[in-house]
Image (tube, rainbow, N blue to C red):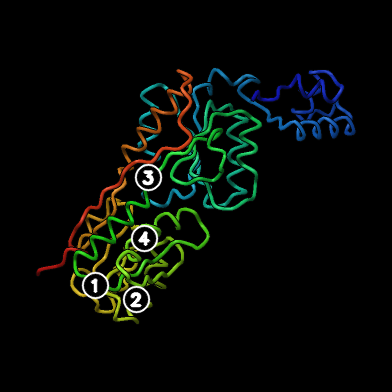
């Protein structure tokens, strides 16, 4: 695919290149009717104004865009930092933006990055259909990697890299069973989202193989939800002797809620989180978690993207990194 140019717009609109340029600058020298027709052609062709080509290329030719769905989550923040530091070693600057799980905002951010001439884009997509981000990127022919979540099925156009979340769920569930747990709840993660299904499916698979009934409490992926929603439900059911959480933030909130209610993690109930963010090793009791080496993943994504840009090596459609359970006192037990 070739990115539509100003010449393509001029030809399709039946005007000169200079007229299109004036429309882009909102010049009063162009009649409103003509400007309206030119803008309609731009929309039809998928033309996006490239500010770099208009004179800023010398300062932005080495830009890479990075759009993250939730930079408040330390898991994504560490990925962004590792990725940025890795590409900086090769004289690329990174423009980082937070879509805040808003598909419309994501599309606006992507358009702005294209306008400012990013050489490529890495995106951890927001959920939702609004905005048409990937159609925009396809028309603009910007090399784009999807990471950690898959927002578009066209992995031939937008290669996808993530972790083997299914195996992580398996490892965590087997570990809890080995610790003597028999009633394991899976908490967090909204229904209908692929990432929730992935992280939950290993749990469901292991329990089914053991003839154990699953208990799923779906919901947000935040610390507040774990504290205010999940914890009261777990406390209300004393038969639950273990919990696997969608992510560490949910589990950290849940741990606080359980402790407030007098149900001691690691003594009265066994707990495992997912992602192994830094805080897992710093709370008490320290939290067992499925470790995704997110710092290494950030460096690997940087290397893959730079190979694509500089060597023309197109990434494979999908790549999954392995995960490892890190057992700590929250599941192994508190002895004192």
Direction from residue 290 to residue 228 in the image, left or right: right
User: Disc 1 to disc 3, how far (Cα)?
Assistant: 28 Å
Q: Nearer the viewer, residue 274 or 20?
A: 274
Vertical relation: 169 (above or below) 98: below
User: Disc 2 to disc 3, how far (Cα)?
Assistant: 28 Å
* Disc 3 + disc 4, Cβ < 8 Å: no
Task: Give the mark toward the camera: 2 or 4.
Answer: 4
**For the point 32% across and 53% down, which residue is it?**
168
Q: Nearer the viewer, residue 141 or 118?
A: 141
Residue 137, x across and y down, in percent: 61, 34
> Circle 1 is placed at which residue position?
269
Direction from residue 9 to residue 162 in the image, left or right: left
User: Disc 3 to disc 4, how far (Cα)?
Assistant: 18 Å
Residue at disc 1, secondary structure: loop
Residue at disc 3, secondary structure: strand
Task: Give the mark toward the camera: 3 or 4.
Answer: 4
> Circle 4 is placed at which residue position?
205
Vertical relation: 39 (above or below) 204: above
* Disc 2 + disc 4, Cβ < 8 Å: no
> Mark 1: few, some, or many residues within 10 Å (few <14, many ≥20)?
many
Direction from residue 84 to residue 131 in the image, left or right: right
N-terminal label among 2 and 3: 3
> Circle 3 is placed at which residue position?
163
Residue 276, x across and y down, in percent: 29, 52
N-terminal label among 2 and 4: 4
Residue 65 seen: yes
> Circle 2 is placed at which residue position?
234
* Disc 2 + disc 1, Cβ < 8 Å: yes
């Amino acid at each position: 695919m070739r990115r539509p140019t100003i010449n393509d717009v001029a030809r399709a609109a039946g005007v000169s290149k200079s007229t299109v340029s004036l429309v882009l600058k909102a010049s009063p020298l162009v009649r409103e009717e003509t400007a309206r027709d030119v803008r309609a052609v731009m929309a039809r062709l998928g033309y996006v104004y490239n500010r770099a080509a208009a004179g800023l290329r010398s300062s932005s030719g080495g830009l890479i865009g990075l759009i993250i769905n939730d930079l408040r989550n330390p898991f994504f923040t560490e990925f962004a930092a590792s990725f940025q530091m890795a590409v900086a070693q090769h004289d690329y600057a990174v423009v980082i933006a937070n879509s805040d799980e808003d598909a419309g905002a994501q599309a606006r951010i992507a358009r702005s990055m294209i306008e400012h001439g990013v050489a490529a884009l890495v995106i951890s997509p927001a959920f939702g259909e609004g905005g048409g981000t990937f159609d925009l990127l396809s028309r603009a022919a910007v090399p784009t990697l999807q990471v950690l979540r898959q927002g578009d099925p066209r992995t031939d156009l937008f290669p996808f890299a993530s972790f083997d979340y299914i195996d992580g769920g398996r490892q965590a569930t087997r570990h809890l069973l080995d610790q003597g747990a028999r009633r394991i709840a899976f908490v967090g993660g909204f229904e209908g989202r692929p990432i929730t299904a992935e992280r939950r499916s290993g749990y469901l698979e292991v329990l089914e193989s053991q003839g154990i009934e699953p208990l799923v409490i779906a919901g947000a992926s935040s610390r507040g939800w774990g504290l205010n929603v999940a914890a009261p439900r777990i406390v209300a059911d004393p038969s639950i002797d273990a919990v696997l959480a969608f992510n560490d933030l949910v589990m950290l909130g849940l741990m606080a809620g359980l402790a407030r209610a007098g149900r001691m993690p690691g003594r009265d109930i066994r707990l495992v989180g997912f992602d192994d963010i830094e805080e897992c090793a710093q709370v008490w009791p320290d939290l067992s978690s499925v470790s995704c080496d997110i710092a290494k993943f950030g460096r690997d994504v940087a290397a893959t993207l730079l190979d694509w840009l500089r060597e023309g090596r197109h990434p494979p459609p999908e790549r999954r990194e392995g995960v490892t359970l890190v057992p700590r006192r929250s599941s192994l037990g508190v002895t004192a």
